[in-house]
Amino acid sequence: MSTCLIETKSLSKRFKDLIVIENLNINIMKGKIYLLTGENGSGKSTFLKLLVGLYKPTRGVIKRSYQNFSYVPELLIYKDKIKVSKYLNRVTKLLNVKRDLEKEEYFLIETDKCLNELSKGNQKKIMLYLAFLKDNEIVFLDEPFDGLDKDILKRVINYINDNSEVTYVISSHNKKVFELLEEKEVISFD
C-alpha cells in the first residue's frame, strides 16, 4: 500500500478578488510522478508554492507527511557576479551535502562560468542538479524542462524515471515531455 505524502482538503487560494485555486482535494502518493497541466495563470505554480509552504492557503488544509524535499522554481534570479563552482560550494554547504562531480558531468554543468551570464537552460540545469543532490522524499519542479536542450532534457527525464522511490510534482507546458515520464498521474488546472 502506497503512503500518502500530501493531502489537500478544500484547498483554496485567492489574491484579492482573483480566485486561483478553489476547493482542491488531492492526495499525492509516494513514488509517483504528478504532472500539473494547464495554461499560464491556471494555478500550477501557485499550487506548488502552497505545497512547499511559500504561500498560505486562503481556505482549506494541506497535510504534509514527508521530511525531505527540494523545490525548483521556474527561474533562478541571481544578480551578483559569482562563478558557478563557488555558487555550488556555497549552496551544497547550506544544504549539508557534498558536490557530486559525476552528477555534474552527467548534467553537463559548466563550473567555470559566472552564474548570471548563463542561459536560462544552463541555470535550470544547475537548479535541477542541486535538487537531485539531496536525499529527497519528494521533489517539486516548476517548469523544469523550459530552456533545456534535447540532450539535457533526455538526461533529466531518464534521471526522474530511474529514481522511482522519489515522488515528483512537476508543472510544465510541454505535454510531449509528459509522454516520456513513467508512473505518472495528471492533475489538470484547465
Image (cartoon, rainbow, N blue to C red):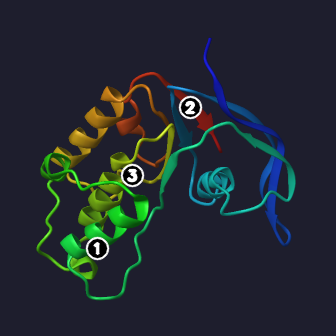
Nearest to the eye among marks 2 and 1: give it. Answer: 1
Q: Where 80 sits versus 155, above or below?
A: below
Q: Position of residue 174 (x, y in %)?
A: 40, 45
The percent coordinates of residue 121 (x first, y second) are 27, 62
Q: Identify the residue at horizontal 35%, vertical 35% (top origin).
A: 160
The mark closer to the camera, 3 or 2, is 3
Amino acid found under the numbered disc labelled 2: Val
Q: Residue 135 carries which label?
A: none
Of the two numbered discs 3 and 1 on the same chain, state the one appearing first in sequence: 1
Look at 45% across and 21% down and name the residue there: 183
Badge 1 amino acid: Tyr
Query: In the image, what residue occupies the spot 28% across and 81% down?
Result: 116
| Residue at point 44%, 26% (across, down) | 165
Quarter of the figure with residue 85:
bottom left
Instruction: Please say if 63 is above or below 121.
Output: above
**Earlier residue among tags 2 and 1:** 1
> Badge 2 is on which residue?
186
Q: Horizontal placement of 4 versus 142: left or right? A: right
Quarter of the image for the C terminus: give it.
Answer: top right
Which residue bears the numbered disc 1?
A: 87
The residue pinned by badge 3 equals 131
